[in-house]
Image (cartoon, grey):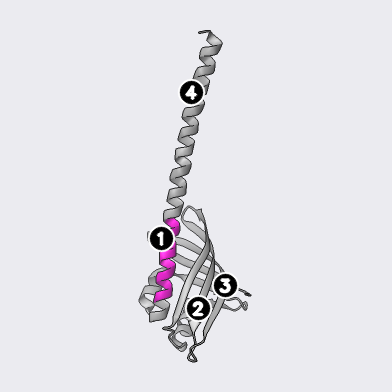
């Protein structure tokens, strides 16, 4: 085998080795991102449940001190205002929330998540009302755990 042939074979073997390592790293990264997406969606559902149950201690653990909520009408609420709104509202037992088109963009100790949100509420008259929103959430790690720092929702007309 000539020097050039040996060099070419070694070059191909090296390329294949590096490509395999890069593919494995990419697979690990995708799996890690999927695991984080599932974790943050579970926290989102826990927040929904805490709001329904008026569990302010749970919300304190899950929302940052400087949490901000931008509603679809442009109104901005902080955590204190959110709690007041929850206290004033009538608990909704006939409500389901579904998420779709979930996208996660991790940035180390923070992450941005986007999703479609469908809320089904059965009114006192028995009629089901369906509302759709596009949500964008900012998550940060504080005290070694993920917490919601901000959420913005925009109403999506059916």
Give the mark, 3 or 4, whose residue is nearer the N terminus.
Answer: 4
Quadrant for residue 152, please give it: bottom right
Where residue 109 appears, as percent x and y from the top left, is 46, 55
| Residue 128 shown in magenta | no
Residue in view at x 39 percent, y 73 percent:
60
Give the mark, 1 or 3, whose residue is nearer the N terminus.
Answer: 1
CB under 8 Å between discs 3 and 4: no
The numbered mark at residue 133 is: 3
Quadrant for residue 94, please give it: bottom left
Quadrant for residue 83, please give it: bottom left
Farthest top residue? 2
Local SS, label 1: helix
Q: How crowded is mark 1: few (under 14 residues within 10 Å), some or many (20 or more)?
A: few
Disc 4 to disc 1, how far (Cα)? 39 Å
Disc 3 to disc 2, how far (Cα)? 12 Å
Label 4 sits on residue: 13
Tell which of 154 and 61 is nearer to you.
154
Label 1 sits on residue: 39
Say which of marks 1 and 3 sits in front. 3
Local SS, label 4: helix
Local SS, label 2: strand
Residues shaded magenta? 36-49
């Amino acid at each position: 085998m000539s020097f050039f042939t040996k060099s070419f074979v070694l070059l191909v073997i090296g390329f294949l080795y590096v490509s395999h390592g890069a593919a494995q790293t990419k697979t690990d990264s995708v799996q890690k991102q999927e695991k984080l997406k599932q974790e943050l969606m579970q926290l989102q559902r826990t927040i929904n449940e805490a709001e329904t149950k008026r569990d302010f201690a749970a919300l304190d653990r899950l929302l940052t001190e400087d949490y901000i909520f931008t509603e679809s009408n442009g109104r901005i609420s902080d955590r204190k205002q959110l709690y007041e709104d929850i206290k004033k509202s009538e608990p909704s037992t006939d409500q389901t929330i579904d998420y779709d088109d979930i996208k996660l963009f991790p940035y180390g100790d923070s992450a941005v998540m986007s999703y479609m949100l469908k809320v089904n509420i059965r009114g006192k008259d028995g009629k089901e009302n369906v509302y759709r929103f596009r949500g964008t959430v900012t998550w940060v790690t504080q005290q070694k755990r993920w917490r919601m720092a901000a959420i913005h929702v925009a109403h999506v007309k059916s």
